[in-house]
């Protein structure tokens, strides 16, 4: 793992910012790409990605593995991810604890499922197959949701923890998702943080939600909200410095707005490091 990436904040790289990044080489620790946007062979987009990789550490974020799906794994999709990973050599590859496909239908959303012992065995089997195929440990993200299942026998935190034990996968903890679920479902985000194994959290996501009045939507179209920043500080105090990504996917602003958000995350990281070094010194 790149030591610079371990202690730095990064930004989700979007197409409209790629030329700016290559022309200006902004001071940012790393970038994460939505790998699904780069699975076609050749062309300018692929060349730009290689150029970015030559300047910055990269990670892959995927939305198509359908880890909790009941259809057979899409091995053609995984083959394209593997080929891209062999070319770009990302620090790691992540996807979501959800399903995105049923039959011939590909959903444009990250759909939840009941957290049961049966589901745990099912998802663990699929994650194991994917990890063996990619020859990489997956990093799996908690998701926001807008409904809950009466059949769930465990919490999402318990499910993720058990999944990491069974498969060796790591966790991508999205704080905005946890806060959205706290408001929408009354699931205390701090309780989730307390129950997760800090050593298994490999990456953190920060994003902005959209307030609909009676509920929140994980829209990725705003700055990180103050309650999410407070949860981030709480998490860093618990886990130590972790690679932290600013996600912004809709109503995308100028790059400097994202850079300012990343700088704020970096300040939290640096504050923790300073306090930790002082405590060790005394």
Image (spheres, rainbow, N blue to C red):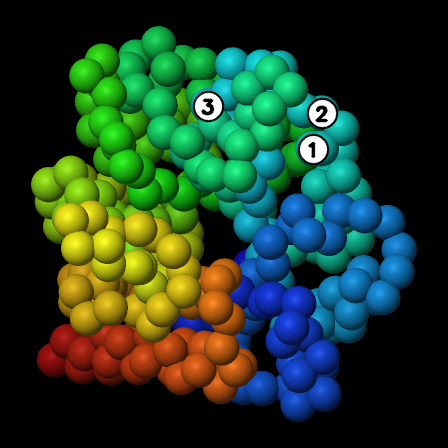
Q: Is residue 39 left or right of residue 185?
A: right
In the image, residue 272 lies at what x, y percent? Answer: 23, 74
Q: In the image shown, does 159 or 202 lie closer to the viewer?
A: 159
- Circles 2 and 1, Cβ within 8 Å, touching? The answer is yes
Residue farthest along the top direction in this orientation: 118
Q: Mark 2 highlights which residue?
A: 75
Q: Residues within 10 Å of mark 3 (few under 14, many from 20)?
A: many
Q: Mark 3 highlights which residue?
A: 68
- Whole-Å distance between the Cαs marked 2 and 1? 5 Å
Q: Residue at (38%, 78%) from the top-left corner?
A: 261
Residue farthest along the front direction in this orientation: 213
In the image, residue 205 lies at what x, y percent? Answer: 38, 58
Label 1: state its secondary structure. Answer: helix
- Whole-Å distance between the Cαs marked 3 and 2? 15 Å
Label 2: state its secondary structure. Answer: helix
Label 3: state its secondary structure. Answer: loop
């Amino acid at each position: 793992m790149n030591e610079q990436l371990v202690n730095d904040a990064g930004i989700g790289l979007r197409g409209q910012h790629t030329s700016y990044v290559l022309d200006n080489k902004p001071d940012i620790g790393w970038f994460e790409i939505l790998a699904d946007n780069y699975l076609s062979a050749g062309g300018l987009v692929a060349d730009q990605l290689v150029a970015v990789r030559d300047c910055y550490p990269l990670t892959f974020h995927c939305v198509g593995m359908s880890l909790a799906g009941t259809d057979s794994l899409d091995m053609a999709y995984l083959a394209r991810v593997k080929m891209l990973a062999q070319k770009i050599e990302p620090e790691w590859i992540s996807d979501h604890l959800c399903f995105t496909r049923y039959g011939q239908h590909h959903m444009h959303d990250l759909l939840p499922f009941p957290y049961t012992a049966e589901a745990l065995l099912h998802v663990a089997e699929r994650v194991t197959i994917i990890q063996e195929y990619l020859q990489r440990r997956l990093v799996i993200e908690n998701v926001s949701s807008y409904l809950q299942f009466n059949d769930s026998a465990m919490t999402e935190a318990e499910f993720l923890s058990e999944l990491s034990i069974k498969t060796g996968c790591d966790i991508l903890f999205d704080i905005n998702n946890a806060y959205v679920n706290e408001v929408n479902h009354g699931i205390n985000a701090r309780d989730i943080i307390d129950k997760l194994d800090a050593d298994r959290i490999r990456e953190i996501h920060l994003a902005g939600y959209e307030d609909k009045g009676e509920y929140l939507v994980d829209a990725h179209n705003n700055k990180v909200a103050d309650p999410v920043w407070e949860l981030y500080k709480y998490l860093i105090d618990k886990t130590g410095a972790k690679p932290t990504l600013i996600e912004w996917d809709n109503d995308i602003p100028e790059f400097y707005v994202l850079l300012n958000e990343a700088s704020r995350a970096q300040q939290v990281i640096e504050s923790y490091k300073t306090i930790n070094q002082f405590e060790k010194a005394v």
